[in-house]
Amino acid sequence: MLVYFVTDEPTKLPAVRAMFEPQHAVVPWLLGGDGTRIRSHGVLMVDVDLRQMPRVDQLRFILRDLAGISEKLFVVHNLSRSMVAQAYALGATAVVSRAKEAIAKVAQIEATEAAAGDKAAISGSEMDEGVAAFASMFSNVRLGKPVKVADAKRATSKIINRVGQDGLSAWLDEVRRYHEGTFQHCLLVTGVAVGFALDIGFSGADVSRLGLAATLHDIGKARIPLSILDKPGRLDPDEEEIIKRHPVIGYDLLKGVTGISQEILDGVRHHHEYLDGSGYPDGLKASQISDLVRLLTISDIFAALIESRTYRPPMPRPAAYQILCGMEGKLEGSLVRAFRSVALGS
Ligand SMILES: [Fe+2]
Ligand SMILES: [Fe+2]
């Protein structure tokens, strides 16, 4: 089960991780930082000093995004009466006096969900762990820390297991149900790329290579302001310029990091290049674009088209595939044809 840990005190995170992991995956959400745009999955655990009004205001803002999560545990140290009342006013479903007491509560919730036959709670652990590793990678980069390659590899291998076991359609449905924005996009691209690699019979090592490139392809977006990144509707030309920097930002973030190969760097920097030279940032032409990048670009465009947004329904997969077919000259035709069964789910 996923435990979303909302706190104003990052130093509390290691102890909470030690408490819950490995049985449950902990996704940190620092007050004032960026969350993962979850919709309705897992348990929320809030450990924030409720005596400080600016923090309560920030918390209220976060909780609005998390309205879909039904179980909300609040830690109120010493159980001061006014703070307990404040917690319930903010939507707490249970209040505990110490973080440690949350373990029993989470176990209880899990047992209740399992008894109710909630399939996501029982079989979703592979997804949960992949998502948690992904979230940890993104939040680190957003906080100005270096990319943890171990998180990226862990997320990729969990997604490969899940797509290999249950198929791409199940992965796409789950991701679109529970996540939003850039985070949803990256999880979708990785699923699609892995599904593509499996479908065309790649070796295990090659599936992992493409999967890792997909996991990291938009990591540069973690450094783009959220107001631009998740803006509903059209971007103005200045905003578009800023967002177009993400391949180079990602490349710079990963350059020189141990465990990141040249081909991953290539994928991160060049997934918006087109064979006819009309892409960015380097305006590469066909012969300069590697096979891995060509596969990644197709997966990226397709995933972007079928994303679920709050302000519009997702495009049906056949319509998205038609758009790829219309991009002749930009994408490799034979690969787009090979992608047909993956795109249509047949
Ligand atoms: Fe991108
Ligand atoms: Fe992308």
Image (cartoon, rainbow, N blue to C red):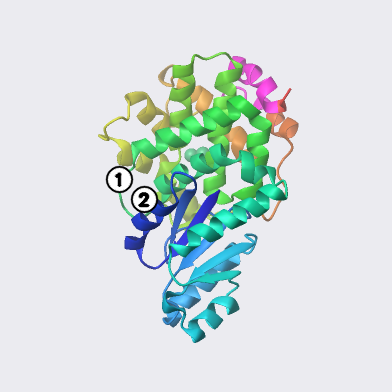
| Residue lying at 46% horizontally and 51% vertically, measured from the top left | 26
Of 216 and 122, the residue lying toward us: 122
Across and down, in percent, residue 337 comes to: 65, 17
Q: Quadrant of the C terminus?
A: top right
Q: Position of residue 302 (x, y in %)?
A: 62, 33
Q: Would the CB of label 2 be found within 8 Å of ligand 1? A: no
Residue 246 percent across, percent down from the top left? 42, 44
Amino acid found under the numbered disc labelled 1? Pro
Q: Is residue 344 above or below residue 250?
A: above
**Where's residue 37, x and y in %?**
55, 55
Is 106 on the left-hand or right-hand side of 80? right
Quarter-of-image position of residue 137? top left
Mark number, residue 146: 1
Answer yes or no: is residue 308 visible. Answer: no
* Rendered view: 2 above or below 286: below
Measured Cα–Cα span from mark 1 to mark 2: 7 Å
Residue contact between numbered discs 1 and 2, judged by CB atoms under 8 Å: yes
Compared to residue 113, the image places residue 207 above or below, namely above
Q: Which residues are magenta?
A: 323-343
Q: Main secondary structure of the magenta part?
A: helix
The reply, left or right, for residue 214 in relation to residue 325 is left
User: Can residue 171 be seen here?
Assistant: yes
Residue at 42% from the left image edge and 26% from the top image edge:
284
Disc 2 crowd rating (10 Å Cα; few below 14, some 14-19, many 20+) is some
Residue of label 2: 140
Amino acid type, label 2: Asn
